Image (tube, rainbow, N blue to C red):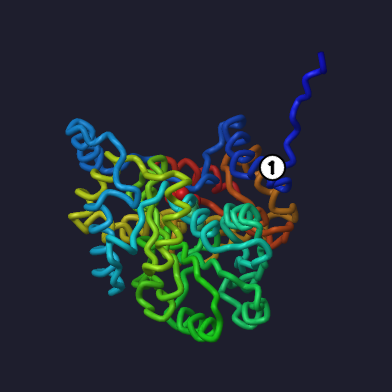
Amino acid sequence: MATALTPQITSRLPQVGTTIFTVMSALAQQHGAVNLGQGFPDFDCDPRLLDLVNQAMRKGLNQYPPMAGVEALREAIARKIGSLYGGEYDPGSEITVTAGATQAILTAILAIVHPGDEVIVLDPAYDSYEPNIVLAGGRAVHVPLTPGSFRPDFAALCAALSPRTRALIVNTPHNPSATAWTAEEMQRLAELLRPTETLLIADEVYEHMVYDGGRHESVARHAELAARSFIVSSFGKTFHVTGWKVGYVAAPRAFTEEFRKVHQFNVFTVNTPMQHGLAAYLEDPAPYLGLSAFYAAKRDHFRAGLQATRLRLLPCEGSYFQCVDYSAISELDENAFCRWLTQEIGVAAIPLAAFYPSPFEQSIVRFCFAKTATTLDEALSRLARL
Ligand SMILES: Cc1ncc(COP(=O)(O)O)c(C=O)c1O
C-alpha cells in the first residue's frame, strides 16, 4: 500500500501573520492593561435595537433573506444616504447589504480587480486592503499620506496612477490618523481621476463620527466621484455592534451587478433578524445623527486628560481614534513603545507603523476612545505617569 501523503498548502497570503491587534490584546490581558488598542466599543448598544432584533427573531424572520439584503433595510439605507448627502441610490439595484465593511471591501475588490491590475492604497491603511488585493491577483501600490499631517498628497497620487490602475481606496474619516477629507480634497480627487478609468472604493465606516462642526465628505455628495465609486459603510461602527457584522455597499447599477455576482457566491446573504432590526431602528435618525456629539464628548474628555502628560496630541477630526506623538518621552520604536506602555504603564495602544507595508517610524501610537468613562478614566490615571 502506498504511504498516504499529507497535502501541503502553498499560502495565498504568505506575508500575513498574527496581527498586531491580536498581539497587543494578548499582551494587555497578560499584564492587566487597559486595552485602548483594539478599535471597538466596550459598552453595549441601545436596548431598543436589541428588542427590535429580538422581535424579528420571534416573528420567525430567521430564514434566508433576499440575496441583496432585506428590502426594508436597503430602502432605509437609500433614505439615509439621500437625506444626509443628497446621493440617490436605488435600493433595488444599487444597494447591497454585506457582512460588515470587511466583506464589502473584499467583494468589491474581487469584482473589479483582474490579475496584474494595480490598486492604490493610501498609507497608513486599514490592514485588510492589501491582502484583499493580493487575493484578487492584483498589486497594491502604496502612496503615503503626507507624514505629519496625514493629508492626501495629490502629487504623489498623480505619480502613482498608471494605465494598470484599476482602483483607489480612500478611507474618510480615517483609521488610524483620525483625519477627515475636506470638500476641497474631494474636489481635487475628482479632477485627478476625471481623465482615468480608476474606480474608487470609499471606506466610510466612520461616516457618523466627524467633530467640531466639520461635515463628512461622503462620496455620495460628489456626483462625479459617486459615478465611479463603491461606497462602503458599517452598522457595527454606527450602532456599537461590531460583532454583528452588518454593513452595506452603495454603487451605481452596473457596478452593483458585478458586485452581486461575487457576493452571491461568497456569503450569498447576511443574517436576517439583524437586518430587520436595523431597518426598524433606522426609522429614527436620532441615534446616528447624535453619534458625533456622543463621541466628541469622549474625545474631549480623553484629550483633556492626555494634556497633562508629555504625549503630544495629534488632531482628531473624525473616527474614534486618537493618535499621540511620544517622542518627548521615549526613543523606543513604536512597537517597543507599545509593549513598554502595556507592560509598565498598563495601557495598550497600537503602533502606527503597523498600518504601513514596511515599518515606518514616526513615534506615533493610536488609542481608541470608544470606551466607557470608567475605562477612559482608568487609562488616564495610568497614563498620568507619563
Ligand atoms: C477603516 C475600516 N474599514 C473597515 C473596517 C471593518 O468594518 P466591519 O467591522 O464592518 O467589517 C474597519 C474596522 O475596524 C475599519 O476601521
Q: Position of residue 9 (x, y in %)?
A: 73, 36
Picture quadrant of residue 204: bottom left
Is residue 237 or residue 364 the one in the foreground? 237
Establish whether ligand 1 lies closer than 8 Å to the Cβ of label 1. Answer: no
User: Which residue matches tag 1?
Assistant: 17
Furthest residue toward top: 1
The residue under the point 55% across, 75% down is 198
Res. 209 in view: yes
Q: Amino acid at mark 1?
A: Gly
Is residue 295 or residue 200 the one in the foreground? 200
Q: Position of residue 209 (x, y in %)?
A: 38, 61
Find numbered disc 1 in the image and state the secondary structure of the residue it sits on.
loop
Is residue 135 or residue 212 the one in the foreground? 135
Q: Residues within 10 Å of mark 1 (few under 14, many from 20)?
A: few
In the visual, does 288 lie left or right of 151? left
Q: From the image, which quarter does the N terminus lie in?
A: top right
In the visual, does 246 lie left or right of 186? left
The residue under the point 38% across, 69% down is 252
